[in-house]
Amino acid sequence: MANNSQLNMRYVWSICLVAACGGLLFGYDWVVIGGAKPFYEAWFSVTDPAASGWAMSSALVGCVFGALLSGWSADKLGRRMPLIVAALLFVVSALGTALASSFALFIGWRIVGGIGIGIASALSPMYIAEISPADRRGKFVAVNQLTIVIGVLAAQLINLMIADPVAGEATQAALRESWNGQYGWRWMFASAAVPSLLFLGLMMWVPESPRWLMLAGKRERALKTLNKIGSPDYAQQTLQEIAHAVQRDRQQTRASFASLLEPRMRPIVLTGMVLAIFQQWCGINVIFNYAQEIFASAGFDINGTLKSIVATGLINLVATIVALPLVDRLGRRKLMLLGAGGLTLCYALIAGAYTLGITGWPVLILVLAAIAVYALTLAPVTWVLLAEIFPNRIRGLAMSVATLALWIACFVLTYTFPLLNASLGAAGSFMLYGVICAAGFVFVLRRVPETKGISLEQLEQQLTTPAAARGEQARQPQ
């Protein structure tokens, strides 16, 4: 385990923060649509719930393609170049969406941005995990979640600053003729181009992952990067660990989708996919994407809704900052159990409030409590676990598959919420999410290992060695 004297922490922080900007753009692009929703829907005359759900979830189609591309590109091109491509996609999507002259073009540009999200959501945490020292890896990967939250809050604040106040009972026709309906929503989307260009410029400076460089046979470049990260002793020790893992991997078949189904790999891949799906089906993203409907049903007008949306972003940010040291201190498994159990309780209370006709501030407080629980637990820890648990040989493909599962789950969640809300009502919808969180608690309790403080190479050996073999190794004299 490296100590502070062996590490150039300023350099490690700087490259990890730049990579985590992919998360910032992910969060910004993901939430900016929530504040713009009533205005672009008025402009494009969207009234059908299915069309509304398609507009909100269309980016997720791009996320699916981006997730698929991320595995191939991570193995062939490295971690750095695909993130540069993602930055370019964010830029063109922001400008294209802002200038869209038809609903079809609007949807098309949202899908382009979704491809960038799919790539960045898979590769930003993977890159950070491969760069970070083992005993600080949880905190560094969790920073990716922090930047997602900062992106979410930034989009909410920018939306609030751009939007003009409107009448609480404004009709869709009135919204269409307002400044927000004519121009405001376009500026909301265009604003994403600014951080996208910044990310693009900064990514030109960061180095390639030393673990990918070793897989590509570029030992000298890998050693050069490791020497920037830490002392010569740290660099040599880490290089030897990576080289040993690479040599072990090369004795096996080349990574392919079929290799994900190998008996020793399949349980790890399945665990990653279920964790990814659970992070989405726990229901929190519904609050961000459909905040307007949720707060309207709780008695808030459109101006109060915009302010309440910002409140959700603030509590999300504060809770994520609190979570950073807890990921390495308490461990991943305990936080996942706390999150699943806490959300089950929050959703039961929210469903009860809607059932009893309680509206306004009590519902807002319960929603903020659910967001705080999620931000402290499932939000950062899921990405940490996904970046850690997959063996080096299949990490790119496995992360791609897990992220693909995440975005498919997110598409189903986002697309179906208006339909669920129409058929089950808010109370029934939140009760359903509570049941899902209870099931997630049971899965984490039975299947998710603790990973804190273990190097990626040691973790790989631990998770892929059969239990009987581990027992035999433990009985052998040291």
Image (cartoon, rainbow, N blue to C red):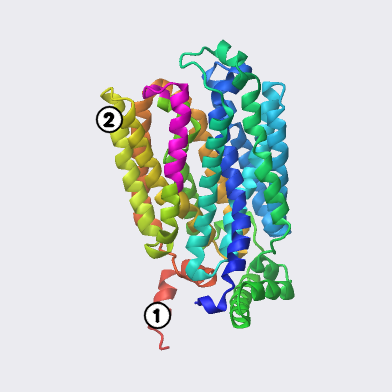
Q: Residue furthest left?
A: 356
The residue to which callout 2 is attached is: 352
Mark closer to the chain start, 1 or 2: 2
Residue located beneath label 1 in the image:
474
- In the image: residue 154, left or right of residue 103: left
Q: Which quadrant is the C terminus positioned in?
A: bottom left
**Residue at the spot x=56%, y=78% of the render?**
6
Identify the main secondary structure in magenta: helix
309 in magenta:
yes
* Residue 303 drawn in magenta: yes
**Residue toward you, 277 or 468:** 277
Residue drawn at x 54%, y 70% as measured from the top left: 133
Q: Residue at x 71, y 46 (%)?
A: 197
Q: x, y (%) of residue 41?
A: 58, 20
Q: Is residue 242 left or right of residue 369?
A: right
| First to last magenta residue range | 296-317
